[in-house]
Image (tube, rainbow, N blue to C red):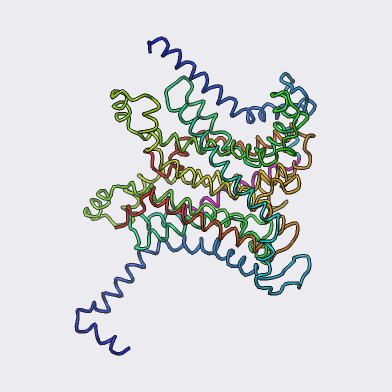
């Protein structure tokens, strides 16, 4: 192969990559475009590409009471992730740096709960919530989301804890450092990026969760996916409004995910990538 | 019993004090683990046990006081229910096809991204976006802007007039799920590609191995651990797919795109049949456990769990 055809080939591959990426993400691009349309331009045949942009849809969404849903989502996501870290960090420590004898049993148990289909528990959860007066209550979601994310978080954080060199810990202990100091000064700096990556993934899964939210909440404690369900009946009529709502509902997680891409990769590959 | 108690005295018995000290040391080690363990049991295992209890009851929520013990009746009903069997088939199809296709697409995209080229960061950002879109939003947007028979972009782009959601409901739902999960697969596989050593790849090229040969003999074996993880995590989430079906097809037309999560939801929250939907939940768990036993074994092999246990 000559250098010239090689360069041509590389250029073609780059072009192909760009084309595939743009096609793949097109539904999202179209969502953004549609959200700035007037309703008359949103559903047309053929599709409208040239139009006067408007912010009308966004103000309509806010008028329809979107903000309380957004606040619920933020509250539930934030607190459930905090709860996951509070419970998960010590557990990951007990399964890695100071391992208990039953480590593999405990890990297996955590992962197996992830394989329990959520539908298998929804009926008792509904009945229990009803009896406790916890239906349509953000605290019920916080507890459930923490339970949903904790197993995966323990697995991820454990793999990050395993990266802490034991010599470092031993050296610090020999120098007379107490356990809390060792944890704070030696272990935490090494595992902090891993904890951040884990938190990020918990945030994504909590923010996008649908099943519990739809079945256990309504107007009071509803999260953004519940707000979107309102569009299920208005199909074909309010595409621009739907696009604006979809954009607003996804934007927080989209921005966090874009900014923290590398953390996302590390978290998902469970610390296998340095 | 007395002989048993006397016997150790002749050997070298660990004094009760050291033993209790050992035991308290073991509990001290377990202490950080316990809150997470107890919380998980309370939130996931206890409701499941209650589901098992409900599954032996005949109980319709709209008829208060109708609750009574019926033994295995609900299970008999479940296995003779043709909709349940169809939903089971749909669930298997949906999970296997979506995981497989998303992984193939993810592998392709990861290979395209695993080079240096202008705008690589932007392309990666674009490609992960479908994973960050709210699944509920993604499902509604695909249903309307893409699949709509009159104004949808698909019919316009291909110059056809197909009622995607009524003629190919399961395929339409699967398209949306694959779109959602391909970036996830791509990210994991890309991580695997970038973890392989450059020297080995260059050495293979020096030895005259072509691209394809290098890919099959060197890259794929190194990727296998990442592929396994991708399949396992993807399957865990996709088998529970609910949003796409609820929002795009409502399981229809008829029951053509009903999967188990959606059917159980319907029986419970539209039919108010607590007993039968609980029995279905238990059956699903039993089947998942069988599959999961194999999956767990894979996971343990891939991640060498014995590491770190001293």
**Nearer the observer, B266 or A168:** B266
Task: Verify whether residue B167 appears in magenta.
Answer: no
Position in image of residue B308 (x %, y %) = 32, 53
Specify the quadrant that holds the N terminus of chain A.
top left
Name which quarter of the figure residue A178 lies in: bottom left
Residue at image position (55%, 51%) is A79
Q: Main secondary structure of the magenta part?
A: helix
Name which quarter of the figure residue A4 lies in: top left
Position in image of residue A145 (x %, y %) = 57, 53
Number of dots carrying numbers: 0
Position in image of residue B231 (x %, y %) = 49, 44
Residue B206 seen anywhere in this rendered image of the structure: yes
For the record, the magenta segment spans: A64-87
Position in image of residue A116 (x %, y %) = 55, 57
Name which quarter of the figure residue A100 lies in: bottom left
Task: Verify whether residue A65 appears in magenta.
Answer: yes
Residue at image position (64%, 60%) is B280
Q: Is residue B92 left or right of residue B277?
A: left
């Amino acid at each position: 192969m000559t250098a010239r055809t090689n360069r041509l080939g590389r250029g073609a591959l780059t072009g192909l990559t760009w084309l595939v990426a743009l096609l793949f993400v097109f539904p999202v691009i179209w969502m953004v475009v549609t959200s700035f349309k007037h309703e008359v331009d949103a559903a047309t045949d053929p599709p409208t590409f040239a139009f006067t942009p408007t912010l009308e849809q966004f103000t309509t969404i806010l008028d329809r009471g979107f903000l309380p849903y957004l606040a619920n989502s933020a509250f539930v996501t934030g607190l459930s992730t905090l709860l996951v870290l509070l419970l998960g960090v010590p557990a990951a420590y007990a399964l890695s740096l100071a391992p208990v004898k039953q480590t593999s049993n405990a890990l297996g148990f955590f992962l197996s709960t992830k394989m329990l289909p959520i539908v298998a528990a929804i009926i008792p959860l509904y009945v229990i919530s009803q009896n406790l007066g916890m239906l349509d209550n953000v605290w019920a979601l916080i507890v459930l989301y923490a339970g949903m994310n904790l197993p995966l978080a323990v697995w991820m954080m454990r793999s990050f804890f395993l990266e802490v060199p034991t010599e470092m810990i031993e050296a610090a202990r020999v120098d007379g450092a107490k356990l809390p100091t060792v944890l704070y000064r030696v272990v935490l700096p090494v595992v902090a990026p891993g904890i951040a990556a884990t938190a990020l993934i918990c945030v994504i899964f909590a923010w996008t969760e649908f099943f519990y939210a739809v079945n256990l909440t309504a107007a009071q404690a509803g999260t953004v996916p519940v707000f979107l369900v309102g569009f299920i009946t208005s199909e074909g009529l309010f595409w621009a409004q739907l696009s604006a709502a979809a954009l607003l509902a996804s934007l927080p997680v989209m921005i966090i995910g874009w900014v923290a891409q590398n953390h996302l990769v590390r978290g998902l590959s469970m610390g296998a990538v340095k | 019993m007395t002989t048993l108690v006397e016997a150790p005295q002749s050997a070298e018995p660990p004094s009760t004090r050291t033993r209790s000290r050992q035991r308290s040391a073991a509990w001290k080690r377990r202490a950080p683990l316990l809150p997470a363990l107890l919380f998980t049991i309370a939130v996931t295992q206890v409701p499941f046990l209650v589901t098992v209890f409900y599954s032996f009851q005949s109980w319709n929520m709209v008829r208060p006081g109708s609750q009574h013990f019926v033994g295995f009746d609900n299970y008999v009903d479940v296995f003779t229910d043709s909709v349940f069997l169809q939903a089971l088939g749909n669930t298997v199809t949906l999970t296997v096809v979506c995981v497989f296709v998303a992984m193939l697409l993810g592998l392709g995209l990861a290979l395209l991204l695993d080079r240096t080229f202008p705008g690589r960061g932007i392309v990666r950002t674009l490609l992960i976006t479908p994973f960050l879109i709210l699944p509920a939003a993604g499902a509604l947007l695909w249903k309307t802007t893409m699949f709509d028979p009159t104004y949808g972009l698909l019919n316009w782009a291909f110059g056809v007039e197909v009622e995607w959601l009524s003629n190919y409901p399961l395929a339409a739902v699967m398209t949306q799920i694959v779109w959602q999960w391909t970036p996830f697969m791509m990210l994991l596989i890309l991580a695997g590609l970038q973890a392989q050593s450059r020297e080995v790849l260059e050495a293979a090229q020096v030895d005259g191995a072509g691209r394809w040969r290098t890919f099959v003999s060197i890259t794929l074996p190194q990727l296998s651990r990442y592929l396994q993880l991708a399949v396992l995590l993807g399957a865990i989430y996709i088998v529970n797919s609910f949003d796409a079906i609820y929002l795009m097809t409502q399981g229809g037309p008829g029951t053509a795109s009903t999967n188990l999560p959606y059917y159980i939801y319907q029986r419970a929250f539209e039919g108010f049949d607590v007993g039968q939907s609980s029995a279905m939940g238990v059956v699903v768990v039993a089947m998942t456990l069988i599959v999961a036993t194999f999956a767990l074994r894979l996971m343990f092999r891939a991640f060498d769990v014995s590491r770190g246990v001293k």
